[in-house]
Amino acid sequence: MMSVGIEAMNVFGGTTYLDVSQLAHHRKLDTARFQNLLMDQKALALPYEDPVTFGANAARPIVDALSVAEKDRIEMLITCTESGIDFGKSLSTYLHHYLGLNRNCRLFEIKQACYSGTAGLQMAVNFILSQVSPGAKALVIATDIARFMLADGADELQAELAFAEPSSGAGAVAFLVSERPHIFQIDVGANGYYGYEVMDTCRPAPDMEVGDADLSLLSYLDCCENAFLEYKKRVPDADYARSFQYLSFHTPFGGMVKGAHRTMMRKITGAKPAEIEADFEQRVLPGLIYCRRVGNIMGGGVLLALASTIDHGNFQNPARIGYFSYGSGCCSEFLSGIVRKEGQIALQQLKIGQQLDQRYALSMEEYDYLLSGNSQFRFGTRNIRLDDDIFPGAKLAQTGKKYLKLREIKAFHRVYEWAS
């Protein structure tokens, strides 16, 4: 079987962030319950940022590192999002244009809640394995943002969004899939998928998200167990506690991952509480470092955890990572792959953590002002000119960096520009 997987990978965690402990205090949330979220910061989208700019800013370093010949071998561009800006036109068309890719390229979009990034990964992997175009590459971009808005005539967010607000982030993960899996080599055929209809969370309108938090947790736990058990049918000697040196989970918030891992260790391995806690810190916590600083980025959530695991794990010897993806509604998958030291070195050269350090910290006053204006960017906005001076400090923090921003929407068509 030929090798296949992620050749290159990058994360864009926004240009601004909010300290979520300040947000919790501002919203007068229950302190004990908030601590269980295991969240530190959340990335935000400014008015001149959207899923296209986030995706392009994640992908640009990957594309720029390729030779002209290698860039021309990108024959598939998949966007994975639940933050689409048009019912028909895919984000991939904008990204294809602003990244300057070859026109002999398939362009399309996948929507399946937070599972979409994994669906894109598997679509790309199987394209490469098919060998219908030997040497081709596929670029997959999972990009999502959350724009909270004040209810009409209200001074604060609706109560049911109180604990969703601190954990909902904005970000993108871009990765190149090829037969040269320098970053993450997929264990081909070693995967278990599991799904069924459940109304845990949904978006009945483009700018509305509703859900049942308790049902979502139960569905996540159910899928984690059953996707792994299906994986085990295909890999009979798989052992949840011993086969994977690290575990990367889809991360709505860190507390949910910790609960899922605790349940799996207790039910699958019979481990005791002290052993479970130590195992969580060793195998799972490395994957939460970036997630705690960006928030839930939906389709890219598990890929953000994977990048965090690779950046912060010990790969002096090749190590296997178990990977669990979940998307509400629902679909889930457990798969695995190998990471080597050279892959970690290659990813660390992109300095994802340093990028997160350089973001601008919004004050609560600035954040509230942002919320009050977000209604201008509702789905289907026809015409608007964007002001990138809304927060001068945020603009100053990007000085000297090449990044894509939204300049205007004119007759529904979005016009972007590369700024530096």
Image (tube, rainbow, N blue to C red):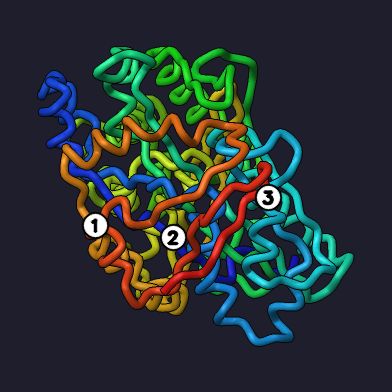
Residue matched to label 3: 122
Foreground pick, 261 / 292:
292
Residue furthest toward the right? 132
Residue matched to label 2: 11
Inter-mark Cα distance, 3 to 2: 19 Å
Q: Nearer the viewer, mark 2 or mark 1?
A: 1
Inter-mark Cα distance, 2 to 1: 17 Å
Q: Secondary structure at mark 1?
A: strand
Residue 394 sits above or below residue 193 on the image: below
Inter-mark Cα distance, 1 to 3: 35 Å
Foreground pick, 19 / 363:
363
The quarter of the image holding the N terminus is bottom right
Residue type at numbered disc 2: Val
In this rendering, position of residue 204 left or right of residue 304: right
**Counting other residues with Cα less than 10 Å from the Cα at mark 1, is it few (<14), some (14-19), or many (20 or more)?**
many
In this rendering, position of residue 142 left or right of residue 213: right
Observer able to see residue 284: no
Q: Position of residue 267 (x, y in %)?
A: 38, 25
Residue 338 sits above or below residue 380 on the image: below
Foreground pick, 219 / 341:
219
Q: Position of residue 141 (x, y in %)?
A: 59, 55
Q: Position of residue 57 (x, y in %)?
A: 49, 63
Q: Quadrant of residue 41?
A: top left
Residue type at numbered disc 1: Tyr
Q: Residue at x 75, y 61 (%)?
A: 76
In this rendering, position of residue 260 left or right of residue 189: left
Observer able to see residue 124: yes
Residue matched to label 1: 360
